Image (cartoon, rainbow, N blue to C red):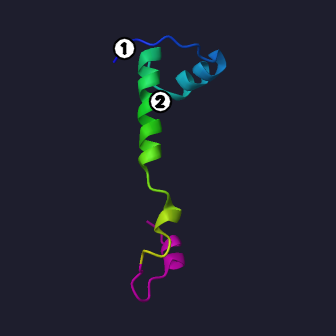
Amino acid sequence: MGRTNIVLDDNLLQEAFRLSKVKTKKELIHEALKEFVATRKRKDLTEIRGKIKFAKGYDYKKLRNRVI
C-alpha cells in the first residue's frame, strides 16, 4: 500500500482518541478501518427473517427473565 495524505476533522479525531486506547493516528485509522470492514461483513438480521425455526416450546421471554 502507498502513502496517503488526508485532512482529518480535529474534533472527530480527538473524540476517537478518547474512545480508543491507541496512541498514534496510524493506529487509530487502522482500528477504524478494521471496525468498518467488520461492521459491513456482519449479516443484517433482517436478511435471515423467516429462515430460523425455533424448537417447540421455545420461550424467549422466559429466558430473558432468567437470573445468571
Q: Most extreme residue toward the left, as rendered?
A: 1
Nearer the N terminus, badge 2 or badge 1? 1
Whether residue 50 appears in magenta in the rendering, the answer is no
Disc 2 and disc 1 in contact, CB within 8 angstroms: no
Q: Which residue lies at the image location 45% right of the left edge and 37% below the top edge?
A: 35
Q: Which residue lies at the image location 44% right of the left edge and 56% below the top edge?
A: 43
State the mark number for residue 32.
2
List x then y, in percent, for residue 37.
43, 39
State the mark number for residue 2.
1
Front residue of 29 and 40: 40
Q: Most extreme residue toward the right, as rendered?
A: 11
Front residue of 12 and 60: 12
Q: What residue type is labelled 1?
A: Gly
Q: Regarding mark 1 in the picture, which secondary structure is present there? A: loop
Q: Quadrant of the N terminus?
A: top left
Q: What residue type is labelled 2?
A: Ala
State the mark number for residue 59.
none
Whether residue 58 appears in magenta in the rendering, the answer is yes
The magenta segment is 53-68
Q: How many labels does the image show?
A: 2
Gap in Å between the C-alphas at discs 2 and 1?
18 Å
Mark 2 Cα shell of 10 Å, populated few (<14), some (14-19), many (≥20):
some
List x then y, in percent, for residue 18.
56, 24
Q: In which quarter of the image is the C terminus?
A: bottom left
Is the residue 20 above or below the residue 67 in the image? above
Q: Most extreme residue toward the front, as rendered?
A: 2
Is the residue 17 above or below the residue 56 in the image? above
Q: Regarding mark 2 in the picture, which secondary structure is present there? A: helix
Mark 1 Cα shell of 10 Å, populated few (<14), some (14-19), many (≥20):
few
User: Would you identify the image quadrant in which residue 14 lies?
Assistant: top right
Compared across the picture, whether 24 is left or right of 6 comes to left
Compared across the picture, whether 3 is left or right of 11 comes to left
